[in-house]
Image (cartoon, rainbow, N blue to C red):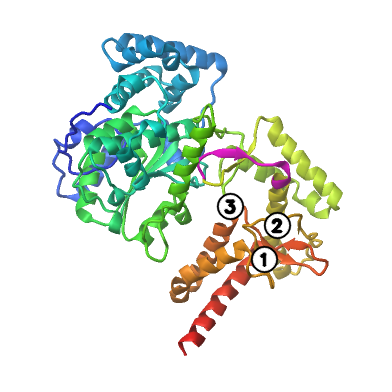
Amino acid sequence: MSSFNVQYNSPKRCCLPDNAAHMHASRSPPSNVDHLDEVIVQGMTHLSFEELQRVQEELHGVPAIIQKEEEELDTLLESFKYHCGRLKRGTAYEIAESVDKNYVCDRNFQLMFIRSNRYDPKASAEQAIRFFDMKMKLFGKDKVAKDITLSDLDDDDKSSLLAGSFQVLKYPDSSGRRILLELPGLSSWRTPENQLRARFYVFMHLAKSADKIGNVFVSYCIGEFRDTTNGAGFVEETRLGLACPNHWSGLHLAFDNRTEAIITKAAIAIMPARMRAITKLHSGSHTEVQYLLSTFGIARESLPIASSTNGAVLTNHLEWYQHCLKREQTCDSPDQMCQPGSSDVLFAGRRINGDGNVRLRSMAMQNAQSYNAGNPKERRVIVDTMVESIKGSGGRFLKLDIDGSSWIEVSMPEVREKIVQMYRNFRRPRASQQKAAGQPSAPPMPLEIADTLHLTDVLFGRQQSHEGNQKLRQLVENTAAEYDAATRGRKKQIVEELVTEIQQPGGRFLKQMKDGRYEVLSIETASAKIASHFRNYRRIQRERNE
């Protein structure tokens, strides 16, 4: 692998894909924070009202998927190739073409750059030139025209990757966009190039899995995750972010240090207008920052940070690494992933506001009265009609695989089960409202029966050794101290987080009936039982201490 010198003259390290990294080191941050806010606002005036509205909607999770017809894509690709031809002389792009022109001219590969730059062929060509220049510096000529796999990383590169300072989170935001998290305090590398090569691998993994709907970047510099390198490597890391074909829908910079916040605001002030518009600063403690991120659709439980100790939890990241390793060892095309489209319904353990999910909820509400009044056979027809409507418009039902590294299609029995659960969730709030208003309630819902048991299920009753029960007990033990000290509202939130933790890998809450079958309990019933677990745990601990 070739190496190159990295400049360490930046006061802040953060892999933001902005277009003004070279200006960062030459500017001194103004001392007046209020004045900085004015500069940021003034800079955003370069955007038109429509542009500002569009990027703000994207930042706040409103789907912004742009669909192009095949003929349009063909025209854009021709323009892209024209601009590449004008720019490539003497660059690594030209070298890559001489090594393997089929790789460079692959349609899907070129479309990554087109989509990354929102169908601007000139900007896409400029990024492709930077991409191959950076790739050849990092990996050399022999690897410039091939997909980089884990086998192309040396042991030091892999150690940097495994450290977890740069990771694709297992669960997306509320709009189904993948989240790239930076935890600077976990950085570990022997040479700067080790970290750059590791990050290149992550960037490209993300580019191949989410190039149509964009990504969200979070730099989390709170507590033990603060940057301890004084900005070492910022310039080259930023150039790397610029070179890789990722479209960013939101940039979130979190700090608990006033000095770093001032420096970062100064950097934002010289960013291009669009980048400034999608950048948000979050300052405060772990709890405060995680709450602020949640208002942008980034759930607290999606962050690999322990709620009790605020330490790093690398389990999902290490599983992602093992999945990538296994996939590359067993697949002929390791980088091909299921990419969500605008019509797809995404199941991710929490509310998703993508077009497919919104359409499914709308259909469910329109058919709610007929569903509630129907018999089991009629309800099955309603559910099947909804499924066929989604599939007929080109949509699929997708969920994240077990390690969260890619989307996979959901089986039809599981899809039906999830839609039935959606109707159950619809009815319960209405039932309580009808009771309060003195109105007759709707007919009771039929029992939902679990045909088979999953290891991730929680069984309420005598069978306490089930794997799902063991996980629930561990979760209760880990959060018991926080639960006991929490307010009533926070206690409810903790219970909801535990419910989500069980449901995310496909777990259910079951109760055995007299005939030996298992009933699927409602979320409300499961939450009440989990709250009871906390009370029982507190009683047992008190008795032991006595």
Say which residue label 3 marks: 505
Q: Residues within 10 Å of mark 1 (few under 14, many from 20)?
A: many
Give residue 247's quadrant in the image. Answer: top left
| Numbered disc 1: secondary structure | strand
Type of the residue with mark 3: Pro
Type of the residue with mark 2: Leu
Say which residue label 1 marks: 459
Image position, residue 330 (x, y; %): 54, 33
Closer to the N terminus: mark 2 or mark 1?
A: 2
Type of the residue with mark 1: Leu
Mark 2–mark 3 Cα distance, whole angstroms, equals 14 Å
Q: Is 353 on the left-hand or right-hand side of 82?
A: right
* Magenta region: 404-414
Image position, residue 396 (x, y; %): 65, 35
Residue at 46% across, 50% down:
316
Answer whether residue 406 is magenta in the image: yes
Say which residue label 2 marks: 453
Closer to the N terminus: mark 3 or mark 1?
A: 1
Mark 3–mark 1 Cα distance, whole angstroms, equals 16 Å
Q: Above or below — where is 332 with respect to 486?
A: above
Mark 2–mark 1 Cα distance, whole angstroms, equals 9 Å
